[in-house]
Amino acid sequence: MGSFELFAVGNINLDITFKLPRMPSLDENIRSNETWIGTGGSAVNYSIAVKNLGYPIYLVAKAGRDAERLGLLEFLQNAGINVSKVSKSDQMDTGKVVVLLLMDSDSRILITYRGANDLLGIDDIPCNQGKSFYHFASVNPELVLAFIERCKEHVYSYDPGGWIFVNPYGVIELSEYVHILHVNRIEFLNLQERTKIDVTELQRIKGVPEIITVKRGDEGAFLYWDGRKYSGHLETSVQIIDTTGAGDAFDAAFNMFYIETGNPLIALKHAIAAGTLKITRIGSSSMPHRNEVSDLAGKVYVSRINSS
Ligand SMILES: Nc1ncnc2c1ncn2[C@@H]1O[C@H](COP(=O)(O)OP(=O)(O)OP(=O)(O)O)[C@@H](O)[C@H]1O
Ligand SMILES: [Mg+2]
């Protein structure tokens, strides 16, 4: 597909992760033996994953008035992310998330303070002149649509995340304007059930979005493309440490290998490999590197399945 300038638009957070032996009860002081502090927020996780795959990327997000004290932007800059398009609120603090992971389980508890993330507006998102690829991660579909109407001509990828539960019709409307739609299986089911609209049927009729992926945790992922449905999964199982950010690792690898090869099936293999590698390490932004992703992609099995 040629070369693009890359943008990741969405949340920036400070994440604090604790691994716990079990669920604590009220008034209990429970000990954790493994913790992680670092950057989080889907746009940040995606940016780091893209960077680790070998591409420069701009992060577009809203940090808070405590950003300097937290050192988040400096950290990201040192990690090779271009933070010149990150704006700062002087009213709210930076988003923060506490992640509680339970030992030997893929269940977790998230405590979220959205803070400055809620203030990201259309004027904070730069409309680039050159050929660009924008990925919107957990951004309000109305904001994404307004931006696309203003900026047009670029390639757009969208992962609505929790916005599917807030504004499912907005996601359906927007899906006609994006090239790639990434959702997980729960979001996918909710989208169909709430709107009674089958987004894959729309895709078959209208030809947009060109690509839909449905992330399915330990069962891999589905890909809807060119009127066909494919399933991808890894034959081997891995040890689950922390599933936070697996979806972002998936989106990043899918988009980069799609840009690189123009082949969604190759992109799917790398995406599943990247998602799987992410869950083997603690921390929302602990993203795999290109060589690891390429090695594991060779073990991902993709097959065409009959659409239903
Ligand atoms: N428990 C698991 N076992 C094996 N692979 C997994 C597991 N969880 C996630 N993955 C891999 O990561 C990919 C993306 O994860 P998932 O399906 O959880 O997406 P998501 O719900 O969007 O994630 P997120 O929680 O980051 O939003 C999956 O398609 C799969 O390849
Ligand atoms: Mg997700």
Image (cartoon, helix red, strand yellow):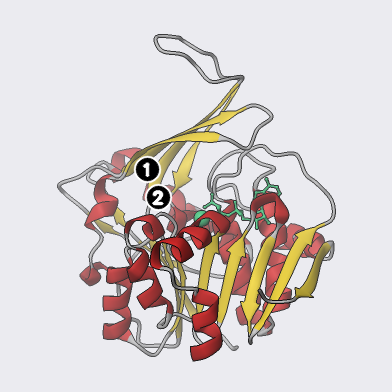
Disc 2 + disc 1, Cβ < 8 Å: yes
- Closest to the observer: 128 or 180? 180
Picture quadrant where residue 191 is located: bottom left
* Residue 216 position (above or below residue 13): below
Residue 106 x %, y %? 63, 37
Residue 193 x %, y %? 45, 61
Q: Which mark is residue 74?
A: 2
- Closest to the observer: 119 or 215? 215
Q: Residue at x 79, y 70 (%)?
A: 302
Q: Residues within 10 Å of mark 2 (few under 14, many from 20)?
A: some
* Residue 48 position (above or below residue 225): above
Q: Amino acid at mark 1?
A: Gly
Q: CA distance from mark 2 to mark 1?
A: 5 Å
Any atom of ligand 1 within 8 Å of the CB at mark 1? no
Which residue ends up furthest to the left in the rendered image?
A: 91
Residue 211 x %, y %? 57, 79
Residue 86 x %, y %? 32, 61
Q: Which mark is residue 71?
A: 1
Secondary element at image label 1 = loop
Q: Quadrant of the C terminus?
A: bottom right
